[in-house]
Image (cartoon, rainbow, N blue to C red):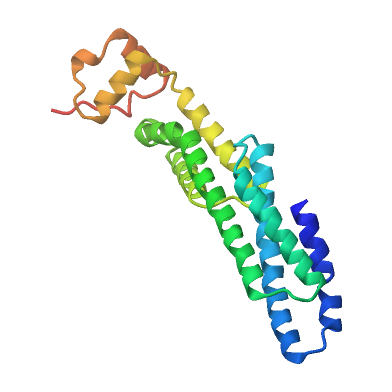
Amino acid sequence: MILDTLKQANSAMLDSIRVTENKQAVKVFKEQIANLNSLITQLDQILNVIVCFEKEKITKGVITEELKNNLLITVDKCGNKVYDHSLDEGTVLALKNICDSCKKTVIDKWTTVSTSKSEVVVSSLTSLRSLLTDYEEIEDIVTEIKNARVHMPTSSKEIKKFLANIDRGTAIVNELHLDKETEEFVDKVKLQCATVEDLTPHILKWIKDNNLMKSLKIRF
């Protein structure tokens, strides 16, 4: 509904300019039309991202009802002022402020949700990478996940890539078949406080099964 209204307003822009006779008014009107057109593009992207969030089951209800209603009202005002050739800077600025609020809301939601979804796998990969064979792949996955978290996605493709990296990272960690005892051992190794006594039959078997005999070294 929002985009339909904006597109209708956009289609009336040229006709509105032609029927406006005052040169100064035409100049001002053209400037605001250009600003409105830019905002339409930005808003279209923001709304598409929100749709992608729901489609890829990232999150729902990204923007509040209050913000949504304010957006609808302001879009209607812009549309009406385009049709009666009275589009002014204040009305366009009001839409810009709401677009900025929507964008900030989407970015904040993405940052929160993406971090929540990926923090466990990123932490695990970071702490276990010295034990894993494909070090470069791990580095690539962790880097791509961290980069994705600080940039608002613009398509379902980007969101799917982010989720795929999480799945791949999780699979890599799961391949180590960690249980409570092995996790405690790995934690001790990371803190450099593991001792020979920690090399229980279960731990030795886990080391052999995961081809880690050459990855772990004893130091005095």
Query: Looking at the image, is 215 positioned above or below residue 178?
Result: below
Q: Is residue 70 left or right of residue 168?
A: right
Q: Which of the image's four quarters has the C terminus?
A: top left
Total labels: the figure holds 0
Q: Residue furthest left?
A: 220
Q: Is residue 91 left or right of residue 136?
A: right
Q: Position of residue 30 (x, y in %)?
A: 73, 80
Residue drawn at the location 59% of the way across and 50% of the way down: 153
Q: Position of residue 104 (x, y in %)?
A: 53, 53
Choose between 95 and 192: the one closer to the eye.
Answer: 95
Residue 85 falls in image quadrant: bottom right
Q: Position of residue 59 (x, y in %)?
A: 60, 36
Residue drawn at the location 42% of the way across and 39% of the way down: 135
Residue drawn at the location 38% of the way across and 37% of the way down: 126
Query: Looking at the image, is 119 positioned above or below residue 196?
Result: below
Residue 22 falls in image quadrant: bottom right
Q: Is residue 146 left or right of residue 22?
A: left
Query: Looking at the image, is 161 positioned above or below residue 217?
Result: below
Q: Position of residue 58 (x, y in %)?
A: 60, 37
Please say whether residue 133 is visible from this viewpoint.
Answer: no
Query: Looking at the image, is 118 positioned above or below residue 143?
Result: above
